[in-house]
Image (spheres, grey):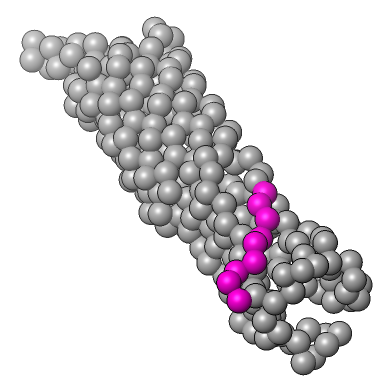
Amino acid sequence: TLLAAACLFSANAFAADGFTGFYIGAHAGHGKGDSDNTVTLGGAWASESPALQAEVADRFSQSLNPSGSTFGVQLGYDHQFASGFLLGGEFDYSQLNVKDTDRTGPQPTTPFPSLNYDFSNRIEANDSLSLRLKAGYTNGSHLVFLTAGVGQVDVDASAGMVSNGGYNKLGTKSDSLDTTVWGVGYEYLFADNWSFRFDYLNTNADDFRYDTVYQPGSSFVSPAYTETVRQDFDYDTFRVGVNYRF
């Protein structure tokens, strides 16, 4: 009887404030996103037929679905109140392998069947960081929480077009984009200093833009034809991890 009471007392004491304190941990998972670009034609494109301009702009504007693995580390602090309510904050850093490439292949244009274009678009997210607030509720060794904050993600993007008429253009962009981040999670304390967690995060990055440039050997350098790419990027991550709590 005394042993059972001691075990019950220990379990209750552990549950009462087991989530309070600093923690550090690691995570791994999978990311999947969307990236749409819109291409605007300028310069000498105004001298071409409206039908050709519309078809080139439409086919050059593509949608990508990047996906891939993610892993990283997190550190934070939680405070568990007697009511079971929890407030905290977390910083995390992730290595990303979230990418996609699309290429249409040479296709003739409707206004001029003898003229074909090959369009390509690529995006890759390399790494990210976020600083987020947490709010949740505990029940014994269990915690469910909401989280939201801001961050950055490093992105490499490119868009190109090649025609059988010798027109060769390519645009590239490498940038750190500001992001907003929100998500939900579940955590379970399975030992005095260790917890297992699962979380879902949605990351929405600022739109970015870049221009294509002529590649060596390209025709129609003067008067200049211009293409401006405006692109967005957002992605979801599903992660599992462990935390060590001090």
- Extreme top residue here? 82
- Residue 58 vs residue 135, the one in the foreground: 58
| Left or right position of 23 against 36 | left
Q: Looking at the image, which is closer to me, 76 or 86?
A: 76
Up-down: is 61 above or below 31? below
- Residue 15 horizontal/vertical position (percent): 29, 17
Q: What range of the chain is rendered magenta?
A: 209-217
Front residue of this view, candidates 18 and 240: 240
Magenta includes 138? no
Q: Residue at x 43, y 49 (%)?
A: 126
Q: Please state, as top left, top right, bottom left or bottom right, where the C terminus lies in the image.
A: top left
Residue at 70% across, 77% down: 219
Please state if 137 lies on the left or on the right of 17 as rendered: right
**Where 116 sits versus 144, above or below?**
below
Q: Quadrant of the N terminus?
A: top left
Answer whether residue 216 is magenta in the image: yes
Q: Please identify the residue farthest to the front as the structure is shown.
A: 222
How far across and how far down the image is residue 197, in percent? 34, 35
- Between 31 and 118, the residue placed more toward the observer is 118
**Residue 188 shows in the view:** yes
Picture quadrant of residue 221: bottom right
- Residue 74: x, y in percent? 34, 31
What residue do we see at 48% from left, 25% from top?
A: 132
